[in-house]
Every structure is written in C-alpha cells, then in structure tokens.
Image (cartoon, rainbow, N blue to C red):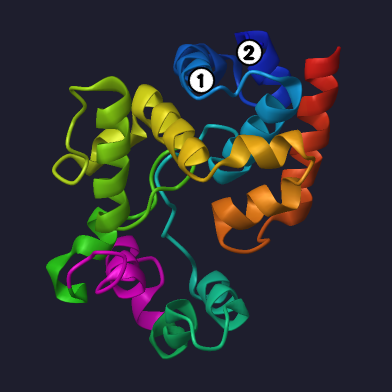
Amino acid sequence: MLPSAETLIKAVGCTPALASRYVGPIREACEAYGITTPKRLAAFLAQTGHESASFGQVSENLNYSAQRLREICAGAPLKSRWRSLLPRVEQLARNPEALGNAAYGGRMGNRAEATGDGYRFRARGLIGNTGAANYEAITELLAKKFGGVPDFTLHPELLESPRWAALAAGAFWDAQGLNKFADADKFDEITERVNGGQYGKADRRTRYSRALKVLSA
C-alpha cells in the first residue's frame, strides 16, 4: 500500500499543492523502508504530519514572541537547555538565529554557540533532524541505502527539499525500528522515539486515527 495525492490530502490534511509535491517522495520513502501496511503508513503519516505541520513546515520555526518563548522555556524540563534560556527570553525573542544557536550550540555534535552551528543544524525534514551529529548520521544512512547522496553537514538546507525530507524521515523510521511498534499498535512508543517525549500527543493521535480511517476506506 502506497499513498496517492488524494490520500495525503485526506490523511495528512495538507493542501493539494503540497500533496502534489510530496506524493512521489513519500511513496519512494515508504517503499524503500517497508512502510506499506495501513498501520505502518497511518503511523508514519501521523508523525510526519504533526512534525511538519501537514508538510507545510520542514525547517524549525524559531521566530517566537517573548510571551510564547517564555512559555516554552518555563514548560521545559528543569535541567534542560531550553529551561536555562529563561533569563535570556527578551534577547532571544524574534531572533531565530540567536535562539537556534543558544538552544542547540555545543551539543548534538554542534560546536559552541558562537560558531552558528546551532542555527545551521536546526530541525529540518518531515521528522525534524537536529544537530550536526544527526545530519552526519542521516547522510550515512541514506548513502548506504541509495548511494550518491549529498553531504547534509555541508548542505543542511537540502533536507528542506521534498525528496530528502521524506527519505530522511524514512531512514530515521527504519533506524529506530518503528515499523514493529506500528504493527503492535504501540503508537505512543513511536511518539517517544520521534519526539523524545509525548509533546503533541493529542494531535498525533488524532492524526493517526484519521489516517487509519482514510487508509481503511
């Protein structure tokens, strides 16, 4: 089972224009990584749909108002990097580059904040690939599968293109063994692997139910 553009519109809630852009790459990714049963496909579309705002946002939005950024930082785990940014909210609000560097600099394979790596390697793709180490890892995974892929550490912006955004999501899905969780109806476990927590759980589950209904029709 591989989705059509009409399926993407109904299951993901994306626009016809986005469905037309993504149907080929999504089909390629799903076929390559065995995401071909209703449960697997529904889970994949639900997670990628949530992570990318229905395929409309494949580069992390770091352009927050001071109020929204304060809410995000205050709601983050106590010892997390995001929580540590509370004293800097006014400085980082409406400053995506500075926020990316402050949030991600010096970790996930990124060099120190001042180097710009944090913003350079912000989340991209249908499942947000974040940090230089993960950009390197996704390059290696895709090279093993397809050969001749770009080096995303040198060209991180390419993960915003439909084909690489979809294939990177498929490679992550496969590397995390998420098909087996989909087969076992362990959708919340998939969320944990994708998100590192249960952020957006209600929306992800709503999307999953909708996708299953569409794929079963």
Residue at the image point whose x is 18% and y is 75% from the top: 112
Residue 12 visible in the shown view: no
Image coordinates for residue 62, horizontal then vertical, percent: 41, 59
102 or 25: nearer the eye? 25
Residue under pointer 2: 3
Kind of residue at badge 1: Ile
Image coordinates for residue 195, horizontal then vertical, percent: 57, 56
Q: Is residue 120 left or right of residue 72?
A: left
Q: Quadrant of residue 67?
A: bottom right
Q: Are marks 2 and 1 in contact (CB under 8 Å)?
A: yes
Residue 42: numbered disc? none
Task: Establish if 193 lies above or below 28.
Answer: below
Name the secondary structure under disc 1. Answer: helix
Q: Is residue 217 magenta?
A: no
Q: Is residue 105 left or right of residue 180?
A: left
Task: Establish if 23 lies above or below 175.
Answer: above
Residue at the image point whose x is 47% and y is 31% from the top: 170
Residue at the image point whose x is 74% and y is 21% from the top: 38
Kind of residue at badge 2: Pro
Q: Is residue 53 left or right of residue 126?
A: right
Mark 2 surroundings within 10 Å by alpha-carbon count, few (fewer than 14), some (14 through 19), many (20 or more): some
Residue at the image point whose x is 49% and y is 36% from the top: 174
Looking at the figure, which quarter contains the N terminus?
Answer: top right
Mark 1 surroundings within 10 Å by alpha-carbon count, few (fewer than 14), some (14 through 19), many (20 or more): many
> From which residue to which does the magenta span run?
90-111
Q: Quadrant of residue 124?
A: top left
Image coordinates for residue 141, horizontal then vertical, percent: 32, 37
What number of labels is visible? 2
Residue under pointer 1: 26
In this view, the residue farthest toward the bottom is 87
